[in-house]
Image: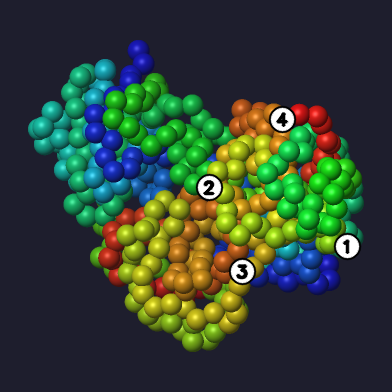
């Protein structure tokens, strides 16, 4: 028996995500993968899947699915109302969805990205070892569209014992991002670096899976112009000519020419992925 | 290695800066040799840029940094491995502009462009898009003032010190001098080596009739 999910409501942007495809940056392939990786891993564990099984990542407005056989789904990440055929169902815990019923993960009440883990995992064909949708370079499956059909893998046998519940991180009301200065801090004036580490920015509505854009003061550069293209790490804080920091998320380009003033610690990127536009942001010098 | 500067890029990565592309290529080749031989401190990704090499997923950045500064590396990349030949139909829309910039007749561009051996300095922009160096400086051309909204897959293009072949259709501002008849070989994720051109690969262009 192979289960298929029909997309009833794709939401604003719902993609298939897993642990991504690291290891190919030298070929120009972004790492991709779930932006809130801890939420993906936890949803998978609650669904009885391996932590890196492919899940659905929604954006703000959730999504709705109809399975053709009974399935178990865990909706985690950004909290949202969950219903099965309109009846309330729990968020953050396994939900049994009968064949032909509609599971709806509603708009996020806090945060931005919810994760739907289906027992067995989303079983689209992998590309370079990953099922993740990479919005920068177009690898992996297309974002969900109404009527699309997604295959579900066989449930893991034996199914690991499910934890009854687990703590979830709350989406931030203020995003505090510890950074490690460099590699190109010397491209900015001392005043520019001070502004970066002391000013309050806000999350821009132009943020996406490629980068968290900010609004706020412009960072003063020591010199204008671009650098010769150089490799970019996840969490790099790149500063384009407008002077407003952009934090690179999982679909970021592998090389770039704008100076990177600092790098955000990877464990803080899950919070960045859940920060809605308008959330205040501060960068603090970490170790 | 002299002239090398190591910059931090977060807690688990180093950005190694070199004086020029030649030495970057030489260090890149040496790092790949050492990784294959198991004599390089563990690193998840080795990502060359124009004059830098990013080492990402580094377990012990301080130790790797020490190893890098004491490396003995030749100043130019040794020519190693097979040469990939790319057939080109020289019929690009910017052929006349490039001929004018080079100061040659339009029908001399193919032979001149195909007379050099190129090396993939780094990849980026799109999966399988390689930045090829090897064009002598007098033949470097600027990007177009207005980028095209669509450059077709297989387009053979020039910009600054680089030459490239577009693995798929994208917007682009490079000067288009020709096209590769079957660009699907440039990027095939189902193949063991997904990218035909990876950093360090040597490349020749060969003029073919349309």
Residues at badges 4 and 3 in contact (C-beta under 8 Å)? no
Q: Nearer the viewer, residue A248 or A224?
A: A224
State the residue lying farthest toward the bottom.
Answer: A191
Q: Which mark is residue B75?
A: 1
x 65%, y 64%: residue: B14
Tell me how far mark 1 sits from mark 2, CA to CA: 40 Å
Q: Is residue A123 left or right of residue B5?
A: left
Q: Which residue is mark 2?
A: B149
Q: Is residue B103 above or below residue A132?
A: below
Display coloring: rainbow
Point out residue B162 in the picture as x, y percentages from the top left corner.
Answer: 74, 54
Q: Is residue A145 left or right of residue A110?
A: right
Residue B10: image quadrant is: bottom right
Is label 2 or label 3 in front? 2
Is label 1 or label 2 in front? 2
Instruction: Determine if marks 4 and 2 fall on one subunit.
Output: yes
Tell me how far mark 1 sits from mark 4, CA to CA: 36 Å
Q: Is residue B41 left or right of residue A265?
A: right
Bin the neighbour count of mark 3 within 10 Å (Cα to Cα): few under 14, some 14-19, many 20 and up: few
Q: Which residue is mark 3?
A: A226
Q: Which mark is residue B6?
A: none
Which quarter of the figure is the N terminus of chain B placed in?
Answer: bottom right
x 74%, y 58%: residue: B141
Residue A64: image quadrant is: top left
Instruction: Determine if marks 1 and 3 fall on one subunit.
Output: no
Tell me how far mark 2 sits from mark 3, CA to CA: 22 Å
Q: Which residue is mark 4?
A: B181
């Amino acid at each position: 028996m192979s289960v298929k999910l029909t997309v009833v409501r794709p939401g604003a942007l719902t993609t298939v995500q897993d642990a991504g495809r690291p290891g190919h940056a030298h070929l120009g392939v972004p790492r991709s993968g779930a932006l809130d990786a801890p939420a993906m891993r936890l949803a998978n564990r609650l669904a009885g899947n391996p932590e890196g099984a492919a899940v659905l990542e929604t954006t703000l407005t959730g999504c709705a699915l109809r399975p053709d056989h009974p399935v178990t789904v865990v909706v985690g990440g950004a909290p949202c109302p969950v219903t099965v055929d309109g009846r309330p169902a729990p968020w953050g815990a396994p939900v049994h969805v009968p064949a032909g019923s509609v599971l709806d993960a509603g708009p996020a009440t806090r945060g931005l990205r919810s994760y739907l883990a289906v027992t067995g995992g989303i079983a689209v064909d992998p590309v370079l070892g990953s099922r993740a949708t990479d919005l920068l370079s177009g690898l992996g499956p297309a974002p969900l569209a109404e009527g699309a059909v997604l295959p579900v893998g066989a449930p893991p046998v034996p199914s690991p014992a499910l934890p009854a519940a687990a703590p979830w991180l709350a989406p931030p009301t203020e995003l505090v991002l510890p950074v490690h200065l460099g590699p190109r801090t010397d491209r900015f004036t001392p005043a520019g670096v001070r502004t970066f580490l002391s000013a309050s920015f806000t999350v821009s509505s132009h943020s996406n899976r490629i980068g968290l854009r900010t609004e706020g003061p412009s960072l003063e550069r020591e010199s204008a112009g671009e650098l010769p293209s150089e490799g970019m790490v996840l969490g790099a804080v790149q500063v384009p000519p407008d002077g407003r920091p952009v934090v690179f998320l999982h679909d970021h380009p592998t090389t770039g020419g704008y100076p990177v003033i600092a790098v955000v610690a990877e464990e803080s990127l899950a919070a960045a992925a859940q920060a809605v536009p308008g959330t205040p942001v501060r960068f603090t010098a970490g170790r | 290695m002299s002239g090398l500067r190591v910059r931090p890029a977060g807690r688990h990565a180093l950005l190694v800066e070199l004086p020029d592309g030649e030495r970057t290529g030489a260090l890149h080749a040496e790092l790949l040799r050492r990784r294959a031989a198991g004599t390089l401190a563990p690193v998840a990704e080795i990502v060359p840029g124009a004059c830098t090499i990013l080492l990402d997923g580094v377990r012990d950045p301080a130790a790797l940094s020490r190893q890098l500064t004491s490396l003995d590396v030749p100043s130019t990349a040794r020519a190693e491995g097979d040469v990939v030949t790319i057939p080109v139909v020289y019929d690009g829309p910017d052929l006349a502009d490039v001929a004018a910039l080079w100061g040659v007749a339009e029908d001399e561009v193919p032979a001149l462009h195909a007379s050099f051996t190129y090396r993939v300095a780094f990849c980026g922009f799109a999966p399988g898009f390689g930045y090829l160096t090897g064009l002598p400086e007098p033949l470097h051309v600027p990007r177009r003032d207005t980028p095209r909204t669509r450059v077709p897959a297989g387009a053979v293009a020039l910009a600054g010190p680089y030459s490239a072949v577009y693995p798929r259709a994208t917007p682009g501002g490079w000067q288009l001098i020709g096209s590769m008849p079957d660009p699907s070989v440039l990027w095939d994720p189902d193949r063991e080596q997904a990218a035909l051109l990876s950093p360090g690969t040597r490349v020749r262009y060969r003029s073919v009739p349309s």
